[in-house]
Amino acid sequence: MSYRNKTYVAFASEDISSYRLMEAWRENKNIDFNFYDAHDLYVSRDTSRPETIKRNLRERMKNAKQLVLLGSTAAKTKGGNGISFLAYELQVALEFNLPIVVSHLDGSRKGNSANYPRPLSAANYHTISVSFQPKIIKYALDNYAATYASSATKGERIYNADVYSSLGL
């Protein structure tokens, strides 16, 4: 297996503008936000067959050390339907046992089960929920993945208010 140093960002197609915003944060010299995007690898064309797209998604995810899910009602629907590419991405993330940061597009800091696809809402997998802001996403990416494997607690986790305050949020 290849060296895992990338962050994989999964999202419903309806939320592509939020993904593009994350890319803009990364390119903005005034925002301390960076991620090595696994989407830059194994590019698929819109005309690719579903099997080819799934194979390329799996190859991208082999390079991922963590996953950010852009949490929304569309992500909940597509991620839990068992047939979409987002559902497949979540299936592979669970198979690879990747730490998952759910960044809620509605700004929720306390978690939001309305944004959780069925595979993640089960108590047998743990995630960390954060609001859709670069500082807290970066904090979760820098800190959550390192402690993920040692955690015995399953289910959704959140950062308390003092973590947000310490980041100026």
Image: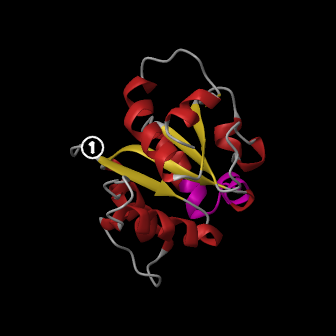
Q: Quadrant of residue 85?
A: bottom right
Q: Nearer the viewer, residue 7 or 62?
A: 7
Confirm whether the magenta stretch covers residue 109. Answer: no
The residue under label 1 is 4
Q: Is residue 40 left or right of residue 108?
A: left
Residue 35 position within the rendered picture, expressed as x and y whole percent measured from the top left: 34, 53
Q: Residue at x 65, y 27 (%)?
A: 155
Amino acid carrying label 1: it is Arg
Residue furthest out toward the top? 152
Confirm whether the magenta stretch covers residue 84. Answer: yes
Q: Quadrant of residue 110?
A: top right
Q: Residue at x 41, y 31 (%)?
A: 143
Q: Nearer the viewer, residue 35 or 113?
A: 35
- Quadrant in which the N terminus appears: top left
Q: Nearer the viewer, residue 12 or 45?
A: 12
- Above or below, comparing residue 148 to residue 114 in the picture: above
Q: Residue at x 21, y 44 (%)?
A: 3
Q: Secondary structure at mark 1?
A: loop
Q: Which residues are magenta?
A: 75-88
- Quadrant in which the C terminus appears: top right
Q: Quadrant of residue 27?
A: bottom left
